Image (cartoon, rainbow, N blue to C red):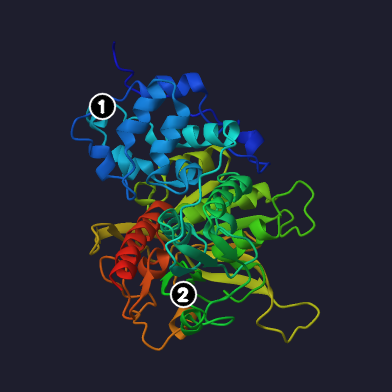
Amino acid sequence: MAINPKKHEMPNQEPLVRARNFDEVALGYSEEIAIAEAERCITCKNQPCVSGCPVNIDIPNFISKIKDGKFQDAYNVISLSSSLPAVCGRVCPQETQCESKCTLGIKFEPVGIGRLERFVADWHNQNSKELPQKAESNGHKVAIVGSGPSGLTCAGDLAKSGYDVTVFEALHLAGGVLVYGIPEFRLPKPIVAKEVDTLKSLGVKIETNVVIGKTLTIDELFDMGFESVFIGSGAGLPNFMGIPGESLKGVYSANEFLTRSNLMKSYLQTPETPIMKGGKVAVVGGGNVAMDAARTALRLGADKVYIVYRRSMDELPARKEEVEHAIEEGIDFKLLNNPVEILGYNNPDNPRDEKNGFVTGMKCIKMELGEPDERGRRRPVEIPNSEFTLDVDTVIISIGTSPNPLIKNTTDNLEVNRWGGIVVTEDGLTSREGVYAGGDAVTGAATVISAMGAGKTAAKAIDEYLKNK
């Protein structure tokens, strides 16, 4: 049978409809499409796709189950390696990971591995009521700091091995960046809640509104009887450009903007806490978070949304799919431009208040690409006398995040590097015995699946550490 050279399209909402609602953009494969896509897999003997997965899912095996229509069996295969399959099927950059290794991709488009993972997870959530069995206790207690992807993965793997696991979350909802950072139209909140409930059924306990470093310290966790600690607190400290006007009202970090939208439920049709009413918005940056912020602003009622990025379309770090969706929805890409000043006027109620004026525009300068930098990307260079003003009243800065410095205060002997990332060995061990770390708290902002991979690595190391201890 001839192989279809292209992966099956993902059904989506129409662009002009979805641009004004927060319903999930991608509608998911049907059973028939999923089987047809699975049949494109040629079942390689060397299984290169597995090596591209940070959590080493047995991809050929679960795809083989889909071919046979055994969707629950496919879910069981994925669950052996991943604690968050419905999440990963939606937000992981499979095109640069497992799908980039697909042998079929040498001649044709690779198998839609991510789309199939999402299908399997959704099928399970819709059709199976069976909860995983709690493992027999081994008598050891482990604390997890942060309920994001690395923390939840580490917790799930340890719980499956019989550990008494408690996750401490600073906010009032479990899920970390999955609930406060990723917008509803890409990752609906009930999907995350379902994954968290699955972990709870394994015996994982979750304590919210606990800020490690303030409410409790790592030292106090050990005093409470925990024998090991995993830090998966993410990278929640936003970076700014250091240009004039960043203290004006109407300037957000993407972190703050998305957190407000998600946790204040501004995505509801009639929100009690709206954070935007019309106007023109500029989002500075070109990554996935910038796309999320721009598309969220559009859905919250912005009249016009710009992406301002200092390189060209070829250098945009965001996923191709997210960029295409943003363009389809009408977001205007101002490429090869860089902000130099945010303009504003003073508070009319207090003319002397110079720090709390309101945004009226953003001065930018045009750029061109020069010689490659140390990472091989062509360095953007300013074009003299090319300044212009973009007419906007909201500016969202999305140029990256760093680990929160609060973590440094949790214990005296926790080594961090110059930008605040926790220093660890290959298996996630920090400079303090019994304390492990992984995900964005170590690497800075990265992908959900890489954070999950770090959580798995640390769980294995903690298991070995406590067995030997």
User: Looking at the image, which is closer to me, 68 or 300?
Assistant: 68
Image x and y of residue 39, in percent: 35, 20
Q: Which residue is mark 1?
A: 43
Q: Residue at the location (35% across, 41% down)?
A: 95
Task: Point out the residue furthest to the left here.
Answer: 46
Extreme-top residue of the structure: 1
Please tell me whether mark 2 sits on a helix, a strand or a loop.
loop
Residue 31 vs 218, above or below: the answer is above
Q: Amino acid at mark 2?
A: Phe
Q: Are marks 2 and 1 in contact (CB under 8 Å)?
A: no
Judge from the rendering whether residue 328 lies leftward or rightward of residue 429; answer left or right.
Answer: right
Marks 2 and 1, the one that precedes in the sequence: 1
Q: Which residue is at a point 71% across and 84% down the rendered structure image?
A: 353
Q: Does the rendering let one see residue 436?
A: yes
Which residue is at the front of the view, 170 or 457? 457
The N terminus - image quarter:
top left
- The kind of residue tagged 1 is Thr
The picture quadrant where one finds residue 172 is bottom right
Question: Mark 2 or 1, which is nearer the eye?
Answer: 2
Q: Quadrant of the C terminus?
A: bottom left
Q: How packed is label 2: few (under 14 Cα within 10 Å), some, or many (20 or more)?
A: many
The crowd level at tag 1 (other Cα within 10 Å; few <14, some 14-19, many 20+) is some
CA–CA distance in space, label 2 to label 1: 44 Å
**Looking at the picture, how far across and down is residue 103, in whole percent?**
23, 31
Vertical position of residue 80 compared to residue 435: above or below: above
Q: Which residue is mark 2?
A: 226
Q: Nearer the viewer, residue 410 or 372?
A: 410
The local secondary structure at tag 1 comes to loop
Residue 253 appears anywhere in the view: no
Question: Which label is found at residue 29?
Answer: none
Residue 435 image offset from top left, x and y in percent: 37, 75
Left or right of 170, for residue 32: left
